[in-house]
Image (cartoon, grey):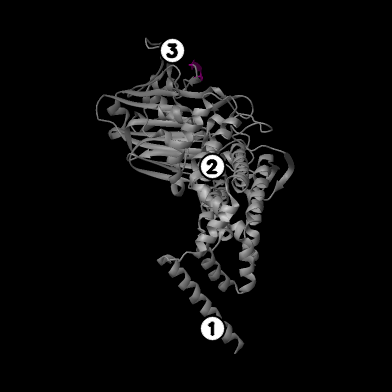
Amino acid sequence: MNMDRNTVIGFILLAGLLFVYLFISTKNTHELQGQRQHYEDSVARVNRALDSAKAVALRDTAIKSALVGDSTLQSTQGVEKLVVVENEVIKISFTNKGGQPGKVELKQYKSSDSNLVVLNGTNFDKISYPVNAASNQALQVADLYFAGGEVVKNADNSQSIVFRAPVANGVLTHRFTIRPNDYLIDFTVQMSGADRLLTQGAFNLTWQNQPVQHESDVKYERLQSNICYYTNQDFDYIMAKTERKFEGQTQWVAVSQQFFNSALYYKGGFSSGETRWLKHTDTTNKIADVTTTLQAKVPLGSDAMIPMQLYYGPNDFRILKSQPVPEMDKVINLGRDMYAFVRPINKYIVMPVFNFFDSFIGSMGIVILLLTLFIRLATSPLMYPGYLTSAKMKILRPDLAKLKEKYPDQQQFAMEQMKFMREAGVNQFAGCLPSLLQIPIFFALYSFFNSNISLRGESFLWAKNLASYDVLVQFPFEIWGLGNHLSLFTLTACATSFLISFYNMASTPDQGNPALKYMPYIFPFILLFVFNKLPAALTWYYTVSNIITLVLQFVIQHYIINHDKLVATIETARKKPKVKSKWAERLEQMQEQQKKLQDERAKQGKK
């Protein structure tokens, strides 16, 4: 084992974990296409059924009018009207149809088309629940036309808007309260005659969402979108799966895109429910169709009140952390599942340092540069032994080359090399640490830069948006692995990685193994395909980090380490009697056994 092998092991671990992550994120593409086709076929069948049912619908309207009386008839027939309510951060267009938010605009964020980000703005988006209008008759609230809609300003500067819908069995009231500088909306459902409107107190809510594109690359945005929920006081999410049943108390569900989310919160908790979603794979700007059904039990009585809250806003950690919704900040992916170990790194180290520099630096590119310098400075005590080993290996390279000539057999050479390194007092595994240390740091920053909304729309050098890839060349077609573009920051990251590999290989002996010899050069080429679709913030960080590595290695080798003194130290260490550790003894025994086994096989082959 030597530095060359240790470096290769680090590269392989980093590449393997990265590919596992990307594979998990993208493995459901073909499944989604099949589900999409199934969905379209089902819609076609439903449309045909609806065409044949128009006459029946007209008949049902007449029957319903006769059964439930004039008040319900007025609620089921009307003209849609919009009422706009806004504060400093959101503008909500309420509709009297269903008595609910019809469109929500985020006043401080723009979409990729330069218009304000709109959430809950499609015909698919709605909130509904069934009520009993008369015996054996049920109406969906989303189909009712509510009265009212006057906006009232309260003493605390909040604004309230109330919608009412009288039906034969009672009165439905939807009350919304919008506070200043807040993305969270209070939504209270009140029922007069609840014991008649609900069957055995069952409140069955249906919440539909159709998030649409807000970023420049809709395909990448779809990969970053997911459904998050809080059930039994535990956060969870789905990304690859298309449905999930909620067993136990569910307090909130959020449909989350890369930088924005829509969430429904009920402090009392829904007793059960499920969510289904279908990611779009076509060329439209639609991300997915999400249908969530939630059930709650309302105490039997003539009056009932169900206090809920709606969140339409950014995936900003500080904003979500300040909400009264439990663990809503976990909507932001700072590390999940097998990569959950990087979340504390992001939460307690990367994010505070980033926010500190951001508080007085105007350029996000410079903030990332300073963050990189901080990380490298903090990890330098751990990295220095690796650099020192590299310097020692460079000094010992002529001796190792002679040893290679003396023992041409690879197995025998490995055994003799281990003895030689131990005699020279060189820690063979210290060179592996720099590569291994990159793994948690890289995945922490991968999650951080992918989910950090403060990078969105921020330009630096040639990159127009640090939250997405920069484009050096735009191709008129798709290239496998690269996509339809080539990123300049990706090229700088790969080029500096290649220089590091070249520098390290220059200080290590020739192993005679092509795989070990060329792997460090192959890895930067692989990074070209991995990095090309990643945010420019990440590839800029990687470029800066690589440049720092090259500078440190050069400075340490030429100005900090005294080569003559190091040679003397090595010679002194070689003359001292050595005591083998148990681990070293076992390793040598294993190598000797492998050598004997190879010799026996060679003899049998000659016979």
Q: Quarter of the image holding residue 76? A: top left
**Label 2 vs label 1, nearer the camera:** 1
Residue 362 drawn above or below residue 226:
above
Q: Earlier in the sequence, mark 3 or mark 1?
A: 3
Residue 589 % position (x, y) = 46, 73
Could you classify mark 2 by the number of other residues whose Cα lies within 10 Å: few (under 14), some (14-19), or many (20 or more)?
many
**Label of residue 446 in the image:** 2
Mark 2: secondary structure: helix
Amino acid of disc 3: Glu
The residues bearing labels 2 and 1 have C-alpha atoms spaced at a distance of: 49 Å
Q: Which residue is mark 3?
A: 150
Foreground pick, 443 / 383: 383
What are the residue bounds of the magenta stretch?
Answer: 78-87
Mark 3: secondary structure: strand
**Label 3 vs label 1, nearer the camera:** 1
Residue at horizontal 51%, vertical 79%?
Answer: 596
Could you classify mark 1 by the number of other residues whose Cα lies within 10 Å: few (under 14), some (14-19), or many (20 or more)?
few
Residue at horizontal 66%, vertical 37%?
Answer: 470
**Residue furthest to the right:** 476
Foreground pick, 21 / 123: 21
**Label of residue 600 in the image:** 1
Residue 93 % position (x, y) = 51, 20
Residue 393 % position (x, y) = 59, 58
Whether residue 350 is visible, yes or no, is: yes
Tag 3–tag 1 contact (CB < 8 Å): no
* Residue 80 lies in the magenta stretch: yes
Amino acid of disc 2: Tyr
Amino acid of disc 1: Glu
The residues bearing labels 2 and 3 have C-alpha atoms spaced at a distance of: 47 Å
